């Protein structure tokens, strides 16, 4: 079974994190939410509290097929400040496995130099943080093993693109139909 991890930091965008994990699970992907805060309860950018499946410090990510960063503020900057996550992203990238970020979160990938020469998208206003990227403004961009999404209203596009990347277009179409999209 394919395995994906969705990282939660204080101030994460609720729709992007939970919507992505939900769609991945509908596609038969073992998607787990992971708190980087040291606590399983994590508060999103709109004050909703969610219980993460796992704590970062207690999880081995060696089985990860995809590492996913939801946006939101200050969630994205909190993700960016967490060095162990950045080291994990670099390792995943070097191993040609999927790294994905939506909304403001591509700023983490841009800061790590992982978007240089790649097509990428993000929430309007964060384009300067996507260092070296060809920022398209599209809903979702897939460039090699890097997937970026524009924002919360496009979470289904983003998540279904991840399903297609991990399980194929037939599964993506099945999940999309089940969601009435």
Image: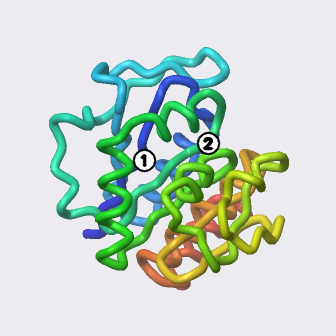
Against 5, is 161 above or below? below
Coordinates of residue 131 in the picture (x, y in percent): 66, 61
Classify residue 56 as left or right of residue 100: left
- The residue drawn where x is 22% and y is 55% is 61
Q: Is residue 148 above or below residue 18?
A: below
Residue positioned 56% across, 45% down in the render: 70
Mark 2: few/some/many CA within 10 Å (<14, 14-19, 20+): many
Residue topped by disc 2: 71
**Picture quadrant of residue 15:** top right
On screen, residue 10 versus residue 143, left or right, reads left
Q: Are marks 1 and 2 in contact (CB under 8 Å)?
A: no
Q: Quadrant of residue 82?
A: top left
Of circles 1 and 2, the one toward us is 2
In-front residue for pair 133/31 = 133
- Where residue 44 sits in the image (x, y, percent)? 56, 24
Location of the N terminus by quadrant is: bottom left
Please state which of residues 49 and 170 is positioned toward the viewer in this rendering: 49
Side (left or right) of 168 relative to 149: left
Q: Residue at x 64, y 79 (%)?
A: 117
Give the secondary structure at mark 1: strand
Q: Percent x, y for residue 33?
A: 37, 41
Binning the other alpha carbons within 10 Å of mark 1 as few (below 14), some (14 to 19) or many (20 upward) gives many
Q: Secondary structure at mark 2?
A: loop
Q: Earlier in the sequence, mark 1 or mark 2?
A: 1
Q: Kindly identify which numbered label has been placed on residue 6.
A: 1
- The foreground one among 120 and 81 is 81
Residue 142: give its label. Answer: none
Give me the C-alpha separation between circle 1 and circle 2.
11 Å
Q: Residue at x 76, y 48 (%)?
A: 126
């Amino acid at each position: 079974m394919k395995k994906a991890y969705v990282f939660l930091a204080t101030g994460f965008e609720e729709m992007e994190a939970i919507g992505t994990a939900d769609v991945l699970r509908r596609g038969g992907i073992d998607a787990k939410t992971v708190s980087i805060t040291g606590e399983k309860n994590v508060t999103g950018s709109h004050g909703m509290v969610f219980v993460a499946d796992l704590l970062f410090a207690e999880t081995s990510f060696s089985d990860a097929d995809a590492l996913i960063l939801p946006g939101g503020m200050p969630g994205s900057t909190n993700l960016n400040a967490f060095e162990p996550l950045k080291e994990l992203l670099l390792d995943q990238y070097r191993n040609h496995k999927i790294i994905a970020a939506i909304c403001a979160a591509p700023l983490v990938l841009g800061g790590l130099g992982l978007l240089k020469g790649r097509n990428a998208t993000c929430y309007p206003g964060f384009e300067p943080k996507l260092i070296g990227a060809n920022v398209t403004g599209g809903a979702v961009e897939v460039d090699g093993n890097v997937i970026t999404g524009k924002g919360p209203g496009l979470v289904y596009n983003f998540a279904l693109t991840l399903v297609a990347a991990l399980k194929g277009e037939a599964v993506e179409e099945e999940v999309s139909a089940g969601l009435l999209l």
